[in-house]
Image (cartoon, helix red, strand yellow):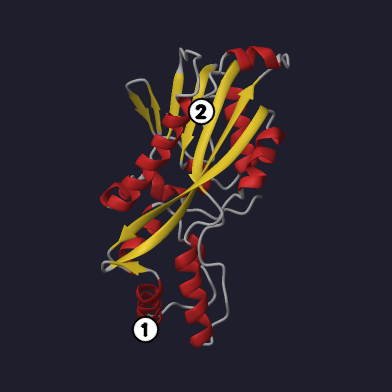
Amino acid sequence: MSLKIFDNGILRKKIQHKYSTVIDLQNLLTQTLQQRLSLFSKKFVSEVWHELAGCRIEKYFVEVNPDMIPFRGVGFDLACSAGPLMFTNDVPGILKQWHQALRHNGVFMASFIGENSLMELKECFFKIEESFSVPHHLRFFPTIATKDAGMLMQRAGFYLPTADRIQHVFKVGSLGELLNALKAMGGNILYEKSNSAITRGFLKAVEKEYFNRYSCSGQLLVSIDIVCMTGWALKDNNEQQIKNGMRYL
């Protein structure tokens, strides 16, 4: 039995839409993929977009578990995952499922939060843990390193896998707003289950440290790395076919 880190039931309830930070992040993840798609001259007949709350297929919306997609063998030309990979308990498994859902020469693209995200928050927690003599814990969700993303794509059977990252900075009004946004995405399951209880005084100290070190105009700065990766479901290893379908700027 694989270890389940994320509470994906929260995603299916769609409560994340109450938080503007989550909406902004989802829009950023989607826009990142849309910008990358502008590099393609290839026309995609059938597309599926997987976002935090579910999948969009043309005008239809389908709720989908981030750990299991119901599209195996469907034969999409394009599958885009804007966000869910960062809350998937079995990343290699879900990538293989997407590979099976594509037809020959189909394209898979994904964007998700990368390894250097939330560094300000993590550093402040680390500093206050030391001052409170609290053992250090991995309190926030793990992320996929950019250098590992291409390897995971290759293991899943994708051809010509590529991965890169871009850093963005959000602003939030308080530590509570940020933690609520993470909870709405199912992304704080680790710190909720850590062995040391988090008191109100502890969180106030973290917020004070955060404002002292990483604030601008009365708001907290939140660094987010967006990793974008692309791969092809190629069955005959015809690399030239792929190159002919792309327009390089």
Q: Where is residue 37 in the image (x, y as percent from the top left)?
A: 47, 25
Name the residue tied to disc 1: 201
Evaluate whether residue 85 shows in this view. yes
Q: Is residue 249 left or right of residue 151?
A: left
Q: Where is residue 90 in the image (x, y as percent from the top left)?
A: 61, 44
* Residue at image location 38% in from the left, 81% down from the top: 205
- Residue 166, compared with residue 221, is above or below; it is above
Q: Nearer the viewer, mark 2 or mark 1?
A: 1
* Residue at image location 31% in from the left, 63% down from the top: 177
Q: Which is nearer the eye, 215 or 45?
A: 215
* Residue at image location 70% in from the left, 33% down from the top: 154
Q: Which disc is residue 70 wearing?
A: 2
Looking at the rendered structure, the kind of residue marked 1 is Gly
Count of number-bearing discs: 2
Q: In the rendered structure, which disc, 2 or 1, sits on the residue that comes first in sequence?
A: 2
- Residue 73, compared with residue 141, is above or below; it is above
Q: Is residue 113 left or right of residue 97?
A: left
Q: Which disc is residue 167 wearing?
A: none
Q: Where is residue 6 in the image (x, y as percent from the top left)?
A: 51, 53
* Residue at image location 46% in from the left, 48% down from the top: 8
